[in-house]
Image (cartoon, helix red, strand yellow):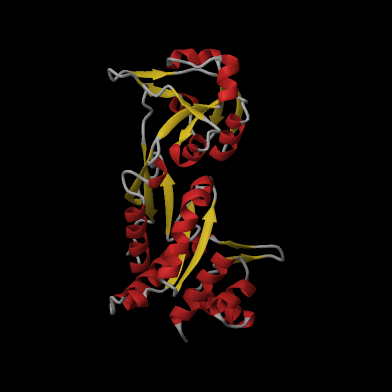
Amino acid sequence: MDRFADIEALVAVIESGTFSAAGERLGVAKSVISRRVSQLEQRLGSRLLHRTTRRLTLTDAGRHFYQRAVQILADLEDAEQGVTAEVTDLRGALKLAAPLSFGLAHLSDALTEFLDTYPAIELNLDLNDRSINLVEEGFDLAVRIGELTDSTLIARRIGTSRTVTCASRAYLERFGEPQHPDDLQHHVGLQYSNVSYRRQWQYATPDGRMLHAQPQLRMRANNGEALACAAAAGIGITTGPTFILARYINEGKLQRILPDFEQPATGIHAVTPPGRLVPRRVQVFIEFLASRYGERPNWDENL
């Protein structure tokens, strides 16, 4: 009886979604995966999975055991990798979550370079702006931008996200260019719905006072790229991160406005689950991202 094989089978089922997919992931038959999970449940004396014809879900006991199981497997793998520090021996699965726009624009190239450097790494990437529970969903790490609301996560700052306000030339020619944040009350605003209205439209005056603008909102979206496209089409004024808007500015599709009124910058962080030894492959990946982005990332070079 191989306890680690049974634990590995359970984790694979949860992360893959089905017994068949877990078998393909581990290179064994579906029946082997099913038998290993059953053996684990028998040994523990508790059902870990609810099985229906449509889906598999964790029981309360299964959820608790899964969190510990992921940690055990990660610690074991890290201990094995720690025996040798050779770069070429960096191997294993890397499950990463990241925001959609940032992932498409700036993370994809980095991941390609990382995978080319470490050919034994297997990547599972989830690009989504939703809030992900790293522990429950089995992620090794996530890239998060902005304030970190979960204080239990282990965070490493890997870069800085700056914010600018922009509009198309066509919009400014039609409605005029605001010279002060108070002028935005007479303009159309495009709102990123994942942050508060007050937070998105805040500015610092040259003497350090904070102002909160109040544009008339016409569009809300949970994706900054959609707002940038709407602004480029002349729908209104948007404010957002330079990792999205810098390209539009450099291409002449958007024009930066209110340059004398600074908006708060936020951190770009790599976060990992609490209470777990971070595998060496994850540590190396975080260092790789930190060296690539840093305090002055490349998308800010021409601004």
Q: Answer with the quarter of the image where residue 164 lies.
A: top left
| Residue 44 seen from this side | yes
Q: Position of residue 277 (x, y in %)?
A: 32, 64
Q: Return the residue nearer the eye: 176 or 203.
A: 176
Q: Is residue 161 above or below residue 39?
A: above
What residue is shown at x 62% (from left), y 82% (from top)?
29
What residue is shown at x 63% (from left), y 30% (from top)?
233
Q: Position of residue 190 (x, y in %)?
A: 56, 27
Q: Answer with the quarter of the image where residue 207 lies.
A: top left
Q: Return the residue nearer the eye: 163 or 178.
A: 178
- Residue lying at the far bottom in this picture: please name it: 1
Q: Is residue 282 above or below residue 242?
A: below
| Residue 151 seen from this side | no
Q: Answer with the quarter of the image where residue 235 lies.
A: top right
Q: Classify residue 98 as left or right of residue 300.
A: right
- The quarter of the picture where the C terminus appears is top left
- Residue lying at the far right in this picture: please name it: 53
What residue is shown at x 35% (from left), y 56% (from top)?
274
Q: Is residue 21 above or below residue 124?
A: below
